[in-house]
Image (tube, rainbow, N blue to C red):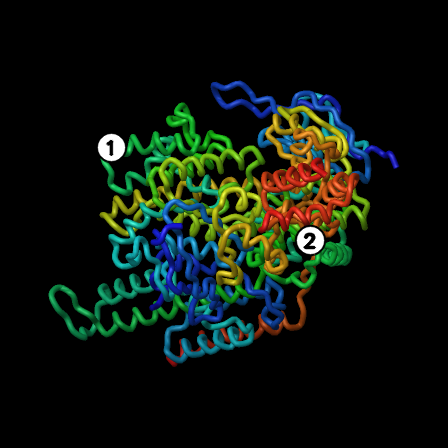
């Protein structure tokens, strides 16, 4: 892939309540890279440090030690660098619909661009574009965000971050609490933003299926450290270790293991339905030939 | 690098320990909540009578003993005081500026008097000891026991048609929601900061306006939570105070009598000492 | 056993209209019977009326039309409300918004206290409920310092302390991570196994629904599908049209069938699916060795 990462952490450590009896090391010596235009999934169970980690990526939390570099520059260098990184690295929190506050959807989406001190025309363009990416229909823009359904509110909140046109879009469990159709639609919208603008996307998720479906690379966090970093195929081949960390493996990988027990061997590590189908169809062709 | 200092707003919120309860099994934890409420009232009264260094020392000794027995860490107590620093500093300054007496030094139109400094110290110590005493009650008594105790103490008011049970339940629910709402506030602040919001720039008016993106979601969330909590309580057969029983029935024991007696003795002692001018 | 736990007849419900808008029909003449001791999963996209239905089962909402009978009791009879709520416990999505105390055991005691149970028996019930959900050691802890899964287990214990005959779970795992989800599902199975309780589980997770006796799919306030998990999940296309998924194994079989492979319609988990596939591939010839040859030939 690309040689130069757009965003990376360098020996990142974070200790909460240092020097008190409540001291807790949430992130320990983490070195990760986010490359321009990639889709990266960060996985780990609750308390593995992934939430603390991603809040470092746009300087919401300062490292106890170590650095975070955006295009090679320390993001915590100055007030200006912090302001800049908030626009370049967009962060969508869990259940983001609970941060809506404006009278209209339009104004709420405009909050980010306004804080960036953009001109009225540019703000208007961005609001409409972001609404489009997030799947917020034009006719909702003048409505109050509080009248919308849960799924629509979620889209408005995501649009509010996309409106800042970040080069790296980080989302913490963007699909939590939605029904299957809602989950798929939201992910399709996020992937649309990724495809059309070339922005990198970092998704924090518990769902192995979704990580497998969308991400080109996965980082597995365990007890504050990076436990694995690689292509899904590579990560899912370590099923036992994942389970030991309290994580699931994708259904299709489970199926592959069950098939193996019954004497049916497939190539590589299968983790998506498409791959499984193609592998089985390949077997079928072999069977028919025989 | 000190990270907690840099975290700014979020760190301050985490220091609010109001409504927190630290479970334990010490004599103080086991005291009847009614006893603890009464002892606190006696303690506060004594604190207001205390005027002299000796009586203050006596009160401080009592407080220290109570903290030591309860095994509540001193660091937790101090952390709880942090949000009060501003109040203490302000009252101190006002006292120093507005108390007349023997001037220590003066510059421009400000004259600092001996009495002013003394008063400021006294008031600060009083506030700190008052708050720490109150912490002792809330840290060692679970909110439910606390409200149960209050409900029983206020029982006689029921005859005057005061909705005692409802008031107690409201207080208990408020205490229950505080930790949740603090967590929520932290999250909302971070989320708005991620959208480029800045809370520490501009004049007072702009700063107040900048709070809207925090306050609006917080209120909405508080209402939503209260509503869901009410539904969940109904689903668990809550129907007011009628015919309610309790997991732990309160019974006054010997230790309660002793605690009350001891605190009455301290109050008496303080009054006597102050009158003797000691 | 064919006792009827819940009998719903022509249930309609609408939320009162805001000014200037028409009332929204949420339930539109729903009819349903649930057997005592059964485990029913209710599926449906957001807004299909699942939660509204759930809230009728313990008289949190009252029918605007039709009727709901719970263990023979009409939910509209005001004097029966407490009895109905005692029999039908309800666990909600967000554990934070259903825990009433800052101490675990006091929270679990809340319902028996409301019911006027004598103190020694409350203690007994609290201990039993906490042991049942595996949280007895945490009885003196503060819930907000525990994990999401642990908090939800406490909420469940708070309901079990009423000793209900039926428990309705309204998306109890939606806010939990996989570990928390497993903890909660483990308790639901245990509740069935050891207490024989009637369980109604509203969920978006198809793997959870696959383990129920019966699956009901709701769509715009009516029952759209009703049957065993196998029967319901076999209708892949119909479910997709309703905005729902099927377990991945079932979707795989569906896609293989479209390619002309004669595999079963439905498999609820990986093991069952593997079994079905193995049976299919082994019918003719020795596939394991065949596949191995091909593996070598492909040189990967």
Q: Nearer the viewer, residue C179 or B51?
A: C179
Q: Say which residue appears at 56% left-offset and 33% top-offset.
A: A181
Q: Position of residue C79 (x, y in %)?
A: 74, 34
Asked whether the beta carbons under mark 2 and mark 1 sit within 8 Å of each other, the answer is no
Q: Nearer the viewer, residue B64 or C50?
A: C50
Q: Position of residue C159 (x, y in %)?
A: 70, 47
Q: Quadrant of residue B248?
A: bottom right
Please, which chain is the residue tagged with disc 2 on? C
Q: Nearer the viewer, residue C182 or B80?
A: C182
- Quadrant occupied by the C terminus of chain B: bottom left
Q: Residue furthest left?
A: B108
The verdict on a common chain for dots 2 and 1 is: no
**Does B277 sit left or right of A247 as displayed?**
left
Task: Using a 10 Å C-alpha cutoff, classify the residue at mark 1 as few (fewer than 14 neighbours), some (14 to 19) or many (20 or more).
Answer: few
Q: Is residue C221 above or below residue B62?
A: above
- In three-dimensional space, the C-alpha distance between marks 2 and 1, rounded to whole angstroms, equals 57 Å
Q: Is residue B201 above or below residue A111?
A: below
The tag on residue C45 is none
Q: Position of residue A104 (x, y in %)?
A: 37, 30
- Quadrant occupied by the N terminus of chain B: bottom left
Task: Look at the numbered disc 2 and give the secondary structure of its residue.
Answer: loop
Q: Say which residue appears at 44% left-offset and 59% top-offset.
A: B14
Task: Look at the numbered disc 1 and give the secondary structure of its residue.
Answer: helix
Please, which chain is the residue tagged with disc 1 on? A
Give the residue at mark 1.
A120
Q: Position of residue A136 (x, y in %)?
A: 43, 30
The tag on residue C109 is 2
**Does C117 sit left or right of B143 as displayed?**
right
Q: Say which residue appears at 46% left-offset and 39% top-offset.
A: A97
Q: Nearer the viewer, residue C278 or A25?
A: C278
């Amino acid at each position: 892939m690309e040689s130069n990462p757009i965003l990376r952490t360098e020996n990142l450590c974070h200790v909460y309540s240092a020097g008190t009896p409540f001291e807790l090391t949430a992130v320990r010596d983490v070195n990760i890279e986010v490359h321009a235009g990639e889709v990266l999934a960060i996985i780990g169970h609750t308390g593995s440090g992934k939430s603390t980690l991603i809040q470092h990526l746009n300087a919401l939390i300062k490292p106890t030690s170590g650095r975070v570099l955006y295009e090679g520059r320390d993001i915590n260098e100055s007030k200006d660098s912090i302001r800049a990184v908030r626009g370049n690295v967009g962060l969508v929190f869990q259940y983001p619909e609970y941060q809506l506050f404006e009278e209209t959807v339009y104004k709420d989406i405009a909050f980010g661009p306004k804080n960036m001190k953009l001109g009225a025309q540019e703000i208007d363009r961005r609001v409409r574009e972001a609404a489009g990416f997030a799947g917020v229909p034009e006719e909702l823009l003048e409505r109050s965000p509080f009248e919308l359904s849960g799924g629509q509110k979620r889209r408005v909140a995501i649009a509010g971050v996309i409106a800042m046109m970040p080069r790296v879009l980080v989302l913490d469990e963007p699909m939590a609490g939605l029904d299957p159709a809602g989950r798929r639609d939201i992910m399709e919208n996020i992937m649309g933003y990724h495809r059309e603008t070339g922005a990198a996307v970092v998704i924090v998720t518990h769902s192995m299926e979704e990580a497998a479906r969308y991400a080109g690379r996965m980082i597995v966090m365990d007890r504050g450290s990076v436990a694995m970093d690689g292509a899904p195929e590579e990560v899912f081949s370590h099923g036992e270790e994942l389970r030991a960390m309290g994580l699931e493996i994708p259904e299709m990988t489970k199926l592959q293991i069950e098939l193996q027990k019954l004497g049916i061997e497939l190539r590589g590590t299968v983790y998506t339905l498409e791959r499984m189908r193609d592998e089985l169809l390949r077997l079928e062709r072999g069977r028919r030939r025989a | 690098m000190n990270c907690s200092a840099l975290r700014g707003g979020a760190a301050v919120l985490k220091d609010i320990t109001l409504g927190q309860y630290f479970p334990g099994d010490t004599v103080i934890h086991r005291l009847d909540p009614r006893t603890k409420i009464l002892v606190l009232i006696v303690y506060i009264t004594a604190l207001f009578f205390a005027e002299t260094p000796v009586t203050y020392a006596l009160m401080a000794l009592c407080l220290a003993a109570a903290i030591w027995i309860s095994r509540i860490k001193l660091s937790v107590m101090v952390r709880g005081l942090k949000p009060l620093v501003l109040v203490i500093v302000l009252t101190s300054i006002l006292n120093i500026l507005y108390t007349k007496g023997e001037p220590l030094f003066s510059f421009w139109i400000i004259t600092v008097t001996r009495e002013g400094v003394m008063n400021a110290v006294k008031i600060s110590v009083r506030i700190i000891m008052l708050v720490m005493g109150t912490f002792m009650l809330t840290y060692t008594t679970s909110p439910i026991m606390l409200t149960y105790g209050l409900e029983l103490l206020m029982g006689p008011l029921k005859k005057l048609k005061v909705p005692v049970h409802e008031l107690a339940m409201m207080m208990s629910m408020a205490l229950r929601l505080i930790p949740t709402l603090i967590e929520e506030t932290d999250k909302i602040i971070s989320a708005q900061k991620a959208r480029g919001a800045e809370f520490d720039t501009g004049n007072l008016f702009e700063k107040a306006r900048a709070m809207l993106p925090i306050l609006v979601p917080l209120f909405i969330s508080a209402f939503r939570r209260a509503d869901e909590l009410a539904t969940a309580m109904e689903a668990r057969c809550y129907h007011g105070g009628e015919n309610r029983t309790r997991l732990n029935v309160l019974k006054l024991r010997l230790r309660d009598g002793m605690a009350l007696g001891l605190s009455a003795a301290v109050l008496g002692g303080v009054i006597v000492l102050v009158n003797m001018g000691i | 056993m064919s006792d009827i736990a819940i009998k719903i007849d022509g249930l309609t419900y609408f939320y009162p209209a805001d000014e200037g808008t028409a009332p929204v029909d949420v339930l539109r003449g729903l009819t349903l019977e649930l057997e005592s001791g059964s485990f029913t999963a209710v599926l449906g996209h957001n807004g299909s009326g699942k939660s509204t239905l759930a809230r009728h089962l313990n008289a949190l909402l009252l029918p605007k039309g039709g009727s709901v009978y719970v263990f023979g009791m009409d939910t509209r009879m005001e004097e029966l409300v407490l009895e109905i709520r005692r029999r039908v416990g309800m666990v909600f999505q967000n554990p934070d918004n259903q825990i009433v105390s800052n101490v675990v055991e006091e929270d679990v005691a809340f319902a028996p206290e409301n019911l006027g149970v004598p103190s020694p028996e409350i203690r007994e019930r609290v201990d039993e409920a906490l042991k049942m959900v595996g949280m007895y050691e945490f009885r003196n802890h503060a819930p907000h310092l525990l994990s999401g899964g642990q908090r939800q287990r406490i909420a469940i214990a708070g309901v079990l302390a009423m000793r209900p005959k039926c428990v309705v779970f309204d998306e109890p795992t939606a806010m939990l991570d996989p570990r928390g989800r497993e903890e909660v599902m483990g308790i639901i199975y245990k509740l069935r196994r050891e207490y024989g309780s009637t369980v109604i589980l509203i969920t978006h997770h198809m793997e959870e629904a696959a383990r129920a006796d019966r699956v009901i799919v709701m769509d715009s306030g009516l029952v759209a599908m009703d049957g065993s998990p196998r029967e319901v999940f076999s209708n892949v296309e119909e479910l997709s049209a309703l905005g729902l998924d099927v377990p991945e194994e079932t979707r795989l079989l569906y896609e293989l069938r479209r390619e002309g492979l004669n595999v079963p319609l439905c498999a609820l988990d990986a093991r069952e699916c593997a079994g079905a596939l193995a049976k299919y591939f082994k019918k003719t010839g020795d596939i394991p060795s065949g596949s191995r040859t091909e593996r070598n030939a492909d040189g990967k």
